[in-house]
Image (cartoon, helix red, strand yellow):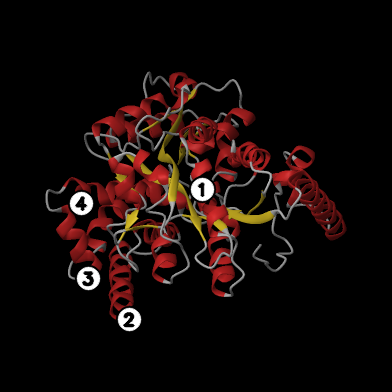
Amino acid sequence: MMKKKGMGTVISILLTAAMLLGGCGSAAETQTPAEETKKETVQQEVKESAVEEKAEETDGEVVELTMFGFKTGAEQGALPELIEQFNNENPGIHVTYEGISNSGGYQDVLTSRLASGQGDDIFMAQAYLGQLQEAGYVKDLSGVSTVADYTELVQDLMTIDGQISGLGMEIAVFGMFVNMDLLKECGIEKAPANYQEFLDACKAVTDAGHTAIACSGKDGTGLAVFAATRGLYPLYQDAEKAAKIEQINTGELSFGSYMKDGFILLKDLIDKGYINPEKALVTEAAKDDIAEFVKEDTAFMPGGSWFVSSINEGAPDMNYILTGVPVMDDDSLIMINAGVKLCINSKTEHSAEAEKFIEFMTGKESLDKYVQSQNSFSPLKDGSSTSNAVVDPVAEYLTSGRMISWVDPSFKSPVEPWTIARSYASNIAAGADIDTTVKDMDTDLTNKIKLK
């Protein structure tokens, strides 16, 4: 087992205590220090008891693996169930899971742990995986047996400089949630299919006294969905996409020249009053925006397919769909990612056991369960995608290729489009001038590329 320092305020989610502590995600954030200490003590006792029982069953030592991830609360979906199943089926191995949300600082904590040598055996990663690979923190998983089961598209999205450092658990989708009943109340019969229809719908909704868009911006997420889809889609449709991405990577081509149109659209929505910038900048993604949307007085919300479970909990009778983001003059788009990449720490002392766990988690049976719980799409050739009618409209965009990737390994650090889009979209919401923002973005990237 790889030891790690205590995290104090970190929400610790131990699989062995999941049945006792289920549903405590948000409540844990408001516990007093005494309650938190008591909870951690109980968790540790339950954890140690489970490991001891396993040792008795196997008549030997149990290999204990720790897993760190950004899935917390309702977003965990089938994750606790799958880890428990693995533990039950492998008495010589015991996996415990700890989670911190992305907005709660997951990336910083993960990087700090790995840099200090206190990293977990297994962890989740997203856009920053390329940096972790470059720093030597992740094991190459190209030889894992389940890699061959992934679709060609997903294998490409998982490959960075010829190495696969993380295996995706799903094809996750960012799109636009639409309250269909509210639109009908305002005289609109269908979800907007392009930008002009979107503007018309927003005007009808606000004229009727409702809110047009619930948009997160505390970490830039919702704001960046608008800016990135509009800004980067021309690049993804370019016949010379690969060559141009390489020019962006070397600084020969301005990344800001693509993002500018996205920033113009975002500012247009703000100037028209359809996005409240002050509110957006304090709205946490997958939390505050959902809380606003489920009040059923808001027509639209940019967000991910994994939001569905939380929306259903908050408004079980709402008539809503997840469809494309209507940012183009003649179309709507989605953003995709080979999401929730599972990685193995290159420094783990239990590489074989960790790989066995990764193979279990990325097998068809496990991924089918996980994908259903996330209302997302399978990354496997013969996998089963979500059957939830709410996200049916998104399937059409996947099939027709009307999409961009928000985590694309063709871009090389420090060019990380999703991270950049979130940061600078927030600047636009804070009142920054578009031309100045584009210039600052390119200058910053150029300097980072030179220093690389």
Q: What element carries label 2?
A: helix
Badge 3 or badge 4: first in the primary sequence: 4
- State the residue in front, 402 or 299: 402
Do callouts 4 and 2 mark residues in contact (Cβ within 8 Å)? no
Where residue 368 appears, x then y in whole percent?
A: 49, 31
Q: Which residue lies furthest to the front in this view?
A: 59
The residue beneath circle 3 is 250
**Kind of residue at disc 2:** Leu
Do residues under tags 1 and 4 come within 8 Å of each other at their CB atoms? no
Do the CB atoms of the residues marked 2 and 3 lie less than 8 Å apart?
no
Q: What element carries label 4?
A: helix
Mark 2 or 3, nearer chain start: 3
Q: Nearer the viewer, residue 75 or 303?
A: 75
- Examine the rendered structure and indicate whether residue 437 appears above or below residue 377: below
Find out whether the residues at labels 2 and 1 contact each other: C-beta distance under 8 Å: no
Dot 1, crowdedness within 10 Å: few (<14), some or many (≥20)? many
Amino acid type, callout 3: Thr
- Residue pointed to by mark 2: 451
Q: In which quarter of the image is residue 126?
A: bottom left
Q: Which residue is drawn at 31% across and 62% down?
A: 434
* Residue beneath disc 1: 358
Query: Looking at the picture, which amino acid does disc 1 mark?
Result: Ile
Q: Where does the image place residue 328, in percent across and percent down from the top left?
A: 25, 40
